[in-house]
Image (cartoon, grey):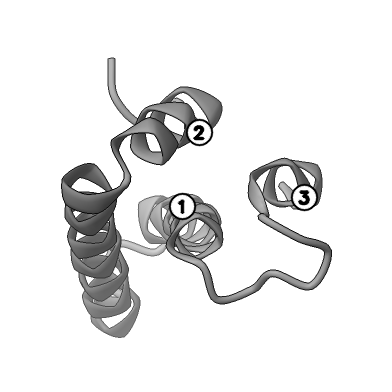
Amino acid sequence: MKDKIKNIANHEKDTGSSEVQIALLTDKILNLSGHINKNKKDKHSSVGLLRAVNKRKKLLEYLKKNKIESYKKLISELNLRK
């Protein structure tokens, strides 16, 4: 995942742009969903998963509204939509 973030980042120390935040949230979502599949009764992690999904959704809406080219590149890079 680190190499994908380097490809997405605008510059070397980019950690705050919407694109990088979406990539980090995607990684977190994948890890949490795997954890929840193994631990069905872990409700705290499922709440964290929902928060991460909602935050990523808001950031994707922002990108789609303001930076459509970056949005399209990010969607294809992270394989988010089919």
Numbered tag placed on residue 26 in the rendering: 1
- Across and down, in percent, residue 5 comes to 69, 51
Name the secondary structure under disc 3. helix
Contact (CB < 8 A) between labels 1 and 3? Answer: no
Relative height, residue 72 to residue 65 (above, below):
above
Numbered tag placed on residue 78 in the rendering: 2
Q: CA distance from mark 1 to mark 3?
A: 15 Å
- Across and down, in percent, residue 43 comes to 24, 79
Name the secondary structure under disc 2. helix
Q: Nearer the viewer, mark 1 or mark 3?
A: 3
Contact (CB < 8 A) between labels 3 and 2? Answer: no
Task: Bin the neighbour count of mark 1 within 10 Å (Cα to Cα): few under 14, some 14-19, many 20 and up.
Answer: some
Q: Amino acid at mark 1?
A: Thr
- Across and down, in percent, residue 13 comes to 79, 72
Relative height, residue 81 to residue 5 (above, below):
above
User: Residue at point 38% right, 32% down?
Assistant: 69
Q: Amino acid at mark 3?
A: Lys
Q: Amino acid at mark 2?
A: Leu
1 or 3: tag closer to the N-terminus = 3
Q: CA distance from mark 3 to mark 2?
A: 13 Å
User: Residue at point 25% right, 69% down?
Assistant: 55
Relative height, residue 28 to residue 4 (above, below):
below
Numbered tag placed on residue 6 in the rendering: 3
Q: Nearer the viewer, mark 3 or mark 2?
A: 3
- Across and down, in percent, residue 60 comes to 26, 51
Name the secondary structure under disc 1. helix
